[in-house]
Amino acid sequence: MGQPEILQRVAAAADDKRAENIVVLNMQGISLIADYFMICHGNSDKQVQAIAREVKGQAEELGLEVKRMEGFDEARWVLIDLGDVVVHVFHREERLYYNLERLWGDAPEIDVQSELLL
């Protein structure tokens, strides 16, 4: 299974739980942590947890190993490590504060939003 399919399924899982402003950054050659970062946010602790649970569930359905999931109980910034893809599910305020898109501003963005509209 290729990266595009994994990114689409993970983004669709977040979208199913009404995640907002889903962004995928191509981190190849920029970060040693992962090839792709997916960043999104929810507007409440419960929504952040629902998004994280759905992403984790879809990843497991795809046969991906969820290497770790951190921050779930606090639901302010949940990090889901899928190996080549790291998913960041923020609470709205934390996303504005940490602003990973600006921090990794040199990373090209992959358009998954248009795919989700189909």
Image (tube, helix red, strand yellow):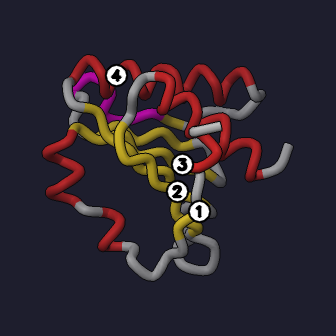
Identify residue for label 3.
113
| Residue at (74, 51) in percent of width and height | 4
In this picture, which residue range is highlighted in magenta?
69-74
Relative to 69, say whether 40 is above or below: below
Q: Secondary structure at mark 4?
A: helix
Residue 82: percent from left, percent from top: 61, 42
Residue 49: percent from left, percent from top: 34, 22
**Amino acid tagged 4:** Gln
Residue 110 is tagged as: 1
| Residue at (60, 36) in percent of width and height | 10
Q: Residues within 10 Å of mark 2 (few under 14, many from 20)?
A: many
Relative to 47, say whether 94 is above or below: below
**Tag nearer the camera, 2 or 3:** 3
**Amino acid tagged 3:** Gln
Identify residue for label 4.
49
Q: CA distance from mark 2 to mark 1?
A: 5 Å
Q: CA distance from mark 3 to mark 1?
A: 9 Å
Q: Are marks 2 and 4 in contact (CB under 8 Å)?
A: no
Q: CA distance from mark 2 to mark 4?
A: 19 Å
Q: Residues within 10 Å of mark 4 (few under 14, many from 20)?
A: many
Q: CA distance from mark 4 to mark 3?
A: 21 Å
Identify residue for label 2.
24
Q: Are marks 4 and 3 in contact (CB under 8 Å)?
A: no
Side (left or right) of 19 relative to 62: left
Q: Are marks 2 and 1 in contact (CB under 8 Å)?
A: yes
Q: Secondary structure at mark 3?
A: helix
Side (left or right) of 83 relative to 54: right
Q: Nearer the viewer, residue 70 or 48?
A: 48
**Tag nearer the camera, 3 or 1:** 3
Side (left or right) of 90 relative to 61: left
Relative to 66, say whether 79 is above or below: below
